[in-house]
Image: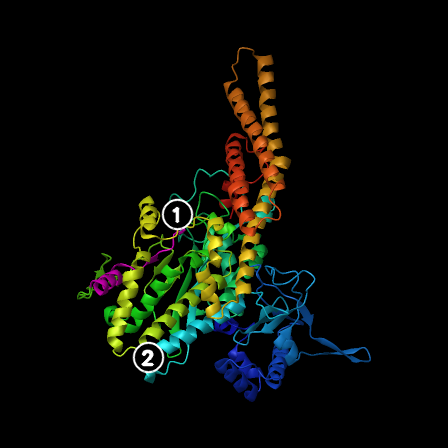
């Protein structure tokens, strides 16, 4: 079979998508299912039974023997509890059975997952409920059913539930507003569309197994910069090495089987770094599929003798890995609401939605910052092409000119479209986009969507997308309240858009976010500069943020405060694990290695002196002296770090404990790392106990 025929047949072969459902599910049950998706009503048990029987038949045909409710708890990864299809029928015999009740609802243990105080340890009951808008799939011999996860009392304990709520919130408010423009359009639904670009590192598995920090923490806690890093940018978009190409080929095929639209693959800027980008789809599907992408990357890498690192900054001194979330809103009539059209200055719907977005990002900049605040991302933000911690919106020259004209109430002259000419006669001219790309911008408009560039490579996109959806829902709701009562709709629309840009234009910045001048300018504008997680997370539960989320039914107050506790607890635990790992590596390996090399140098000096007393031994003396001083310093710093861990506050507030781990423990870790990295540059390679950055970054 040719690739032309094989790939289309392969795509979605392990997904119980709508096309497959039509082959296995009775027509009447399919119609009931479709009606439930449109109305939001629960699926009747009779239809659920029909769909469950069809799922089971399809799954057994594809070798699956078990089913699992696949959910996304607040750990940031997915969870599964597997049950087989077998049921006894007496006489020592069984049948393969799967009921609608088993499809719709499961009961995993809720006590062992983070709840932020919503559940006591002894309160174990929790429920997983089928999300009928997401298609089931087969993975590792099990039928995986995407579900939401909630407590016995109904509180959301997962990331999918708030995302679904936020999807509905922005849909509800957008549809209402659009109907004010043209009720004849009959827009029935507005759906957030998302395309998450996934960056990652690949390193050799054998080298990975020799580093305790990579195995326990996902990042290298030590490591001096190699002589060559990414200075020449020769890795970026370069030829893909055979071993990596083989990994990428298998990754594509595994993802295609699951119905994931894996589209683009290339080398990223740092050595050993790569990227995969899918085709746009609805936010719920994009979220589920990105979780599958991360899991599949790790599994496929192992089969190639590699390890896929998803940490935001596994190696200091080179680019970290982000997950750029491309976000827009689309109607069921096929319109992208962030598409400016040929004349954006005359596109009223586009300008209104643009104004709503800019206003929302400005008003809820702290909440948006919190959606990407965690320990791993602290190492990445603000350096090597990652955006800074200050939230701003990049719009580009044409949109900025339009906004300036609106604010100044002056005429706008449409920008003349330019053409770039390559200089080779056989190549066609390339139309020039009036919106450039700004790699330093946290939130950048890129033609017909916004690219949120701050999310980290390891995190679920559900959190950031939930915030984007909800702040948009809020601003559209406010705009609707003004416009629906306006006696002169067009005047009210103009005034509303102008007012939004006048009052919230401070969030728009089209320059270089890395320059110190921008930090000073942002402070003058009154923008928040939440430089790290310890500074950011306390703002998560600002009254305006709690009011926003509860007003639109995305979180209850209790659910929001529980997440606040979970985020702070995770930060403390990550720093604690990293610090304890650092102490362990220093005590068991690094101190001894440096001491052994120092001893060898001293032994060499003694032998030289015995053989030729006149020899000065400058090299050995200098090295031994430097290593001895550094090793003594390292011992002292390690004791300080260990003491800091042992005396960490217990019983203090979550914010106080988080601040302690940032201000004291993380600072002590930085001091230890600096000394270890200096020791590494002085110690002979055969004595150094761990693979170096050179080994790790250039091993594949």
Dot 1 lies on which element?
A: loop
Q: Earlier in the sequence, mark 1 or mark 2?
A: 2
Q: Position of residue 548 (x, y in %)?
A: 45, 65
Residue 441 percent across, percent down from the top left: 36, 54
Residue that appears at 58% across and 35% down? 640
For label 2, the SS is: helix
Which residue has dot 2 on it?
Answer: 180
Return the x and y of residue 579 as percentages of the image width and height.
58, 42
Residue range highlighted in magenta: 383-408
The foreground one among 490 and 516 is: 490
Cα separation, mark 1 vs mark 2, equals: 53 Å
Graded by Cα atoms within 10 Å as few (under 14), some (14 to 19) or many (20 or more), the crowding at tag 1 reads some
On whether residue 667 falls in the magenta region, the answer is no
**Most extreme residue toward the right, as rendered?**
91
Q: Which image quadrant for residue 631?
A: top right
Q: Nearer the viewer, residue 75 or 248?
A: 75
Find out whether the residues at labels 1 and 2 contact each other: C-beta distance under 8 Å: no
> Of residues 371 and 421, which is closer to you in this image?
371
Give yes or no for residue 395 being in the magenta stretch.
Answer: yes
Image depth: mark 1 or mark 2 in front = 2
In this rendering, the answer to whether 164 lies above or below 567 is below
**Residue 228 relative to residue 645: left or right:** left
Q: Please tell me in which quadrant of the rendered image residue 355 appears.
A: bottom left
Q: Is residue 405 visible?
A: yes
Which dot marks residue 234? 1
């Amino acid at each position: 079979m040719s690739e032309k025929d094989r790939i289309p047949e392969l795509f979605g072969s392990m997904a119980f998508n709508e096309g497959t459902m039509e082959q296995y599910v009775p027509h009447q049950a399919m119609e009931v299912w479709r009606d439930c998706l449109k109305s939001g009503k629960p699926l009747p048990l009779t239809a659920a039974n029909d769909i469950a029987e069809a799922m089971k038949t399809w799954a057994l045909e594809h070798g699956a023997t078990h089913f699992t409710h696949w959910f996304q708890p607040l750990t940031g990864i997915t969870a599964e509890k597997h049950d087989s299809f077998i049921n006894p029928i007496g006489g020592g015999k069984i049948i393969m059975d799967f009921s609608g009740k088993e499809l719709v609802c499961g009961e995993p243990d809720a006590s062992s997952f983070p709840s932020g105080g919503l559940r006591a340890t002894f309160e174990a009951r929790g429920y997983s409920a089928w999300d009928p808008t997401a298609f089931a799939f087969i993975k590792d011999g099990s039928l995986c059913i995407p579900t939401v996860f909630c407590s016995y009392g109904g509180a959301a304990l997962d990331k999918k539930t708030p995302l679904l709520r936020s999807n509905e919130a922005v849909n509800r408010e957008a549809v209402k507003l659009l109907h004010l423009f043209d009720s004849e359009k009959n827009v029935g639904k507005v759906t957030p569309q998302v395309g998450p670009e996934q960056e990652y590192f690949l390193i050799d598995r054998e080298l990975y197994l020799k580093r305790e920090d990579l195995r326990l923490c996902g990042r290298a806690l030590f490591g001096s910069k190699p002589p060559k890093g990414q200075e020449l940018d020769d890795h970026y978009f370069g030829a893909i090495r055979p071993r990596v190409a083989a990994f990428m080929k298998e990754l594509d095929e595994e993802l295609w089987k699951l119905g994931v639209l894996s589209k683009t693959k290339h080398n990223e800027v740092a050595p050993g770094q790569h990227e995969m980008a899918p085709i746009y789809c609805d936010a719920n599907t994009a979220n589920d599929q990105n979780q599958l992408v991360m899991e599949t990357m790790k599994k496929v890498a192992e089969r190639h003798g590699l390890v896929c690192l998803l940490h935001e900054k596994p190696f200091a001194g080179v680019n970290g890995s982000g997950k750029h979330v491309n976000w827009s809103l689309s109607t069921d009539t096929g319109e992208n609401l962030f598409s400016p059209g040929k004349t954006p200055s005359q596109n009223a719907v586009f300008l209104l939605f643009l104004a709503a977005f800019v206003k929302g990002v400005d008003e809820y900049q702290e909440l948006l910052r919190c959606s990407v605040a965690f320990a791993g991302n602290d190492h990445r933000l603000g350096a090597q092409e990652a955006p800074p911690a200050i939230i701003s919106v990049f719009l580009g020259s044409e949109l900025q000119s339009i906004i300036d004209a609106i604010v100044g109430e002056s005429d706008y002259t449409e920008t003349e479209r330019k053409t770039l000419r390559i200089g080779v006669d056989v190549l066609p001219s390339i139309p020039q986009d009036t919106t450039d790309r700004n790699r330093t911008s946290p939130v950048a408009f890129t033609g017909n969507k916004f690219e949120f560039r701050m999310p980290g490579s390891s995190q679920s996109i559900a959190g950031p997308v939930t915030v984007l959806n909800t702040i948009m829902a809020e601003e559209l709701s406010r705009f609707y309240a003004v416009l629906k009562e306006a006696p002169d709709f067009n005047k009210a629309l103009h005034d509303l858009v102008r007012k939004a840009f006048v009052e919230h234009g401070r969030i728009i910045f089209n320059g270089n976010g890395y320059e110190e001048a921008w930090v000073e300018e942002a402070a003058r504008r009154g923008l928040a500069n939440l430089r790290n997680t310890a500074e950011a997370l306390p703002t998560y539960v600002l009254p305006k943020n709690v009011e926003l989320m509860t007003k639109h039914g995305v979180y209850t107050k209790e659910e929001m405060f529980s997440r606040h506790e979970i985020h702070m607890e995770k930060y403390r635990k990550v720093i604690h694990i990293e610090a304890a790992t650092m102490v362990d590596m220093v005590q068991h390996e690094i101190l001894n290695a440096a001491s052994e090399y120092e001893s060898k140098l001293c032994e060499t000096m003694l032998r030289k002196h015995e053989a030729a007393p006149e020899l000065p031994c400058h090299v050995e003396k200098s090295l031994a002296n430097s290593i001895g001083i550094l090793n003594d310093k390292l011992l002292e710093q390690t004791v300080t770090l260990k003491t800091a861990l042992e005396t960490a506050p217990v019983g203090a507030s979550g914010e106080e404990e988080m601040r302690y781990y940032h201000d004291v423990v993380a600072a002590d870790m930085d001091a230890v790392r600096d000394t270890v990295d200096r020791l590494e540059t002085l110690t002979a390679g055969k004595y150094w106990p761990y693979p170096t950055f050179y080994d790790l970054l250039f091993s594949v």
